[in-house]
Amino acid sequence: MIAETVCSAVSAAGLGIAIVTAYRKRYLAAVRIAAYSLVPIGLVMTGVVEWLADTAFSPTAWAGFGVLGLAWVLFMTTRAVERRRGGTRKERRAAAREAGRPDAVAPAAGTPSLGQGTRPANRPAPASRGDDDFSDIEAILKKHGI
């Protein structure tokens, strides 16, 4: 009963503000304020406020909200674990099927990708402390053929 009274008072105050706003020749704002002020009384008339008041003071309803919160936490935890594992269940199944096939490995996978020909023939000697700092840069430039 208190909630209905408060909603009615809020609606009456909002309509009063709308009248003052209309008196100041701001009709669009006045209509918008009137629309907002009619929402609480509409909620009272439909019974939503009574349902919310009954729900707010019901231990069973709060236990239900707790169960919903727990379900949400569990759902988000499983999503986080799924992302860390690398995909959805469908993607993991497809990867497992691909791993079970004998031709899943590339033909040249057994050979190293960097052969002997890619290494420089002679390595530059480590620079002593007395050398200038440009020896490292010169070695990099020589390596790239510049």
Image (cartoon, rainbow, N blue to C red):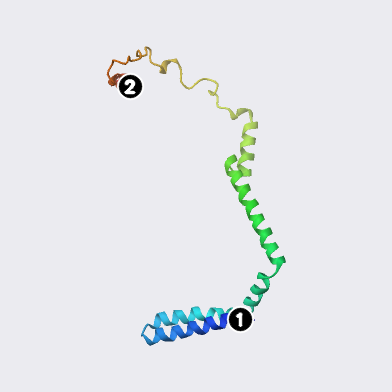
Label 1: which secondary element: helix
Left or right of residue 77, residue 130 in this image:
left
Q: Position of residue 45 (x, y in %)?
A: 61, 82
Name the outermost residue toward the front: 2
Marks 2 and 1, Cα distance to the nearest angstrom?
81 Å
Nearer to us: label 2 or label 1: 1
Of 68 and 89, which appears nearest the observer? 68
Looking at marks 2 and 1 on the same chain, the residue that comes earlier in the sequence is marked by 1
Q: Which mark identifies residue 137? A: none
Label 2: which secondary element: helix
Q: Is residue 114 above or below residue 51?
A: above
Q: Residue tagged by mark 1?
A: 4
Q: Amino acid at mark 1?
A: Glu
Quarter of the image with the N terminus in it: bottom right
Q: Is residue 125 above or below residue 60?
A: above
Residue neighbourhood size for the residue with mark 2, other residues' Cα within 10 Å, grouped as few (<14), some (14–19), many (≥20): few
Q: Position of residue 103 (x, y in %)?
A: 60, 28
